Amino acid sequence: MGIQKHFKAFHDTIKLGRKDDAYASAREKDDSIKEAIKKTFDESGYPVVDDFIQGSLAVHTGIKSRDTDFDIDRAIVIDSADAPENPIEPKRKIKDVLEKRGFTNVRIKKPCVTADYKALDLHIDFPVYKRSGTDYKLAVGKAGSSDENKEWADADPKRLEAWINDDSSYLGSKRDKHDQFRRLVRYVKRWRDHQFSEDVARKIYSIGLTVMIKDCFSPSFDQDGKPCDATALSQTLTNILSRGYFIQQMEEGRYRVKVALPVNPWRDIFDGSSVNTGTQLFNKLSRLRKKVDQALAENDEIKQCRILNEVFGDEFQVPDQKNESKTRKAAFATAGCVGTSQGA
């Protein structure tokens, strides 16, 4: 297994799923708040017709937060026929519910209502949609927004989830390849959290990283069908850096990043992001690829892990050399690894 066993241990340490025991209290709080919102919306004349988890938990790419916070992204859906003209109105109702239930820092942001529940290390986002048939529109606007800055805007959360979860373009062992794709997303999200300042990391959106990796994913498995995550990551990063997401600016070595949503409204995920954000992302992705390639070229597992620990953080553990007297060589881990290009 070589370096792959260390990637597996890293993945098992950082991954988070909605059904995980560590998530139990957050899940119970989410369910309770959801019922309170439904009651309030019903009393207000626009009953909830659907609700669903979206984001990383819906597509199985969630990771444990470094600050121990649990994130919930819960969509609330009302019928278009019942929806108020003002999209801020239902968001104010959610804000009232959250404040009464002990949440702090409750804010009506442009795409959602967001709040924290410190007792459970819980951060929660509630986007509100109105739906007509299969068409969704998102309640957009902050509290106090002028008419031109608030709207029911085109959105397609279900198709976005389906696009990320789709494995139809993979040849052969589709499930194994899609599982590898999800692992790569988790690795890169943890890398972002480790390598960037908190302020910059917030602007390197998880959905942007996920779309780039999905678009550029290059699966890699050895001749026995065993995954080679390091090779897959290297090849996928090479594709990302050459795909055209990074737009060279007039000043040499400066970039903007542009990644289009793969579904309606097809907007740029990083719209409005600074040149500084794009430049940092390009340079650090380039360095990540270089470090992964450096690890692949090493012949010693401990040295490989030291290199990867540097880019991913201490959750990518370096084995104790005293307990690794029979360290396997990396050549065993990477021999026969082949990359395939059936990405999404």
Image: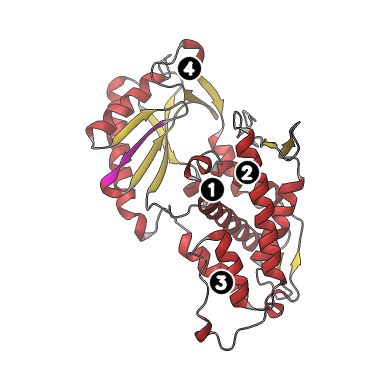
**Mark 2 = which residue?**
280
Residue 217 lies, with reference to residue 31, above or below; the image says below
State which quadrant residue 161 falls in: top right
Say above or below: 123 vs 153.
below
Whether residue 21 sits left or right of residue 152 in the image: it is left
Return the residue at label 4: 150
Please state if 91 lies on the left or on the right of 283 as rendered: left
Q: Quote the CA–CA distance across marks 3 and 2.
A: 27 Å
Residue 1: tell me if it is visible. Answer: no
Identify the amino acid type marked 2. Answer: Gln
Q: Which mark is residue 196?
A: 1
Write down the residue under mark 3.
6
At 72% from the left edge and 63% from the top edge, which residue is drawn?
A: 172
Please, is residue 9 above or below residue 253 in the view?
below
Sequence order check, earlier mark of 4 and 3: 3
The percent coordinates of residue 290 (x first, y second) are: 70, 59
Mark before the other along the chain sequence, 1 or 2: 1
Q: Which residues are magenta?
A: 113-118
Element under disc 2:
helix
Q: Nearer the viewer, residue 35 or 107?
A: 107
Measured in 3D between alpha carbons, the distance from the residue under mark 4 to the one under mark 1, in whole angstroms, is 32 Å
Tell which tag, 3 or 2, sits nearer the viewer. 2
Query: What's under tag 3, amino acid-wise?
Result: His
Helix, strand or loop status at disc 3: helix
Q: CA distance from mark 1 to mark 3?
A: 23 Å
Asked if the magenta segment contains residue 114, the reply would be yes
Q: Amino acid at mark 4?
A: Lys
Residue 129 position within the rendered picture, expressed as x and y whole percent measured from the top left: 46, 28
